[in-house]
Image (cartoon, rainbow, N blue to C red):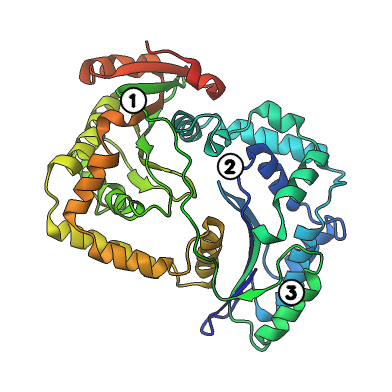
Amino acid sequence: TVIFIPLPQQFTTHVRWVNKTGLANSDALVRMTKQLLTYGSQKLPNPEFAETVAMSGNDLTYSTSLERTEISVSVLAQDLEQTLRLLALNVQYPDWRQKNWQAMQNQLTLEYKAMNTLGSSLAYQGFNQLLYPKSHPYGQIKSTIGELEKTRLPQIESFYQQHFKPENSALILAGQWQPFSQKEVMQWITQYFSHNSLSLKASKNTTKDVKIIEKKTEAYEGKTIHIIDRQGAAQADIYVGAITVAKLNTDWFALHFASTLLGGGAHSRLFRDIREQRGLAYSISAAQTNRKMEAPFYVRTNTANEKVAATLRGIQQHFQALIDVEIPQNEIQLNQDFLLGRLASNFETPEEVAARAAYYFALELPSNYLQTYQNTISRINAQEIKSIARKYLVPEKMIFLIVADYDWILPQIRQYLPEYQVTRHPAALSIISQKQPQ
């Protein structure tokens, strides 16, 4: 699909290629594919590819997420044809004979090893492993170093041909391409993407109506605090949350609203209390994630080791308050204004508009999604939030995960949260599910 979004008031065009293949398909192979694409094309290998990209005025940006892979760049209209040619060469003819493959693989492995020593990375990955069983697509997003080291080019080529198909891809152009007409730009796309890397059909809508995708996980019993033992850590990284719903489930909007009320910015309850009043953490946030399949609602923060128990108790109290305490109408109105205002600000630049279009395409959101979002948020009420909290956000059923020095924080957990069992996990997360409570 080719999606044109004219923005006559802008001076540039943002070009974004998106494919519905992400880390949930294969963490190792998607990371390797992204790395390989940055090295150019069979028909225009590095360094010539890099030099030609630089001459167009902006570098190509490569990114991956759970459910999509993207390449993007912003250019002036005079450089648009050259950019489309380069992008087409890149995605249609990856360099499967890459001479620098071993060095590339070593670099990615070293970066991955370094990333996995960070407390924030360990917390995210550990939280994800506790949420999803290995049989679930989202339960397979963490590669081992061994998997990265064993990956070979023929595997990546086979994976690319299987997943990066025309029906899974879109090319999005947002901005100003005058003095060229849309017809002329479409002719360039047809010419350069002739090797079947896109379903060459111009469209103004990113998606069609689709069914909700749900793949149920087993209910989590809760009442356990999981500690990933990062010995010598100077601070603790914390996740608290639970599996809720997929993006297209109608309950998603109320959960999204609840996450904004709890931790969506400086106006939110957690920020004003945990940070401003109690001084327990510098930053704290809450989110209802956006995924095709059931996704987590979570609170995330980091704090000093000696403040872990107080921070956890504070988070727990705020979840319980959503269930027990009436929400004032002025707080509902404040968060409605915040969300609807933020929505408008997401469409100010060509980059933002194209990124949103790619997101809607990858998650297969219906064409009326924006209107549905605005209507639902503007009509939401306090009773809906209390009802959704009772259904999904009961503290006793949530996962509590901490990455910290186990010996340092265990005594305060025992003292201030005695009703919780404590389970210790080593920093080698591959065996997180095998440890028993201690």
Disc on the earlier residue, 3 or 1 = 3
| Front one among 92 and 168 | 168
Left or right: 46 with respect to 175? right
**SS of the residue under disc 3:** helix
**SS of the residue under disc 2:** loop
The answer to whether residue 383 is above or below residue 338 is: above
| Front one among 225 and 295 | 295
Residue furthest to the top: 438
Looking at the rendering, which quadrant does residue 42 occupy?
A: bottom right
Residue at figure coordinates x 46%, y 52% from the top left: 212
Nearer the observer, disc 3 or disc 1?
A: 1
| Front one among 76 and 351 | 351
User: x and y percent of residue 276 in the render?
Assistant: 22, 44
Q: Which residue is mark 3?
A: 189
Task: Report how many numbered discs are placed on residues in the image.
Answer: 3
- Circle 3 packing at 10 Å, graded few (<14), some (14-19), many (20+), is some
User: x and y percent of residue 14 in the render?
Assistant: 60, 71
Q: Which residue is mark 2?
A: 24
Tag shown at residue 221? 1
* Amino acid residing under circle 2: Ala
The answer to whether residue 174 is above or below residue 229 is: below
* Amino acid residing under circle 1: Glu
**Mark 1 → mark 2, Cα distance in angstroms:** 25 Å
* Amino acid residing under circle 3: Ile
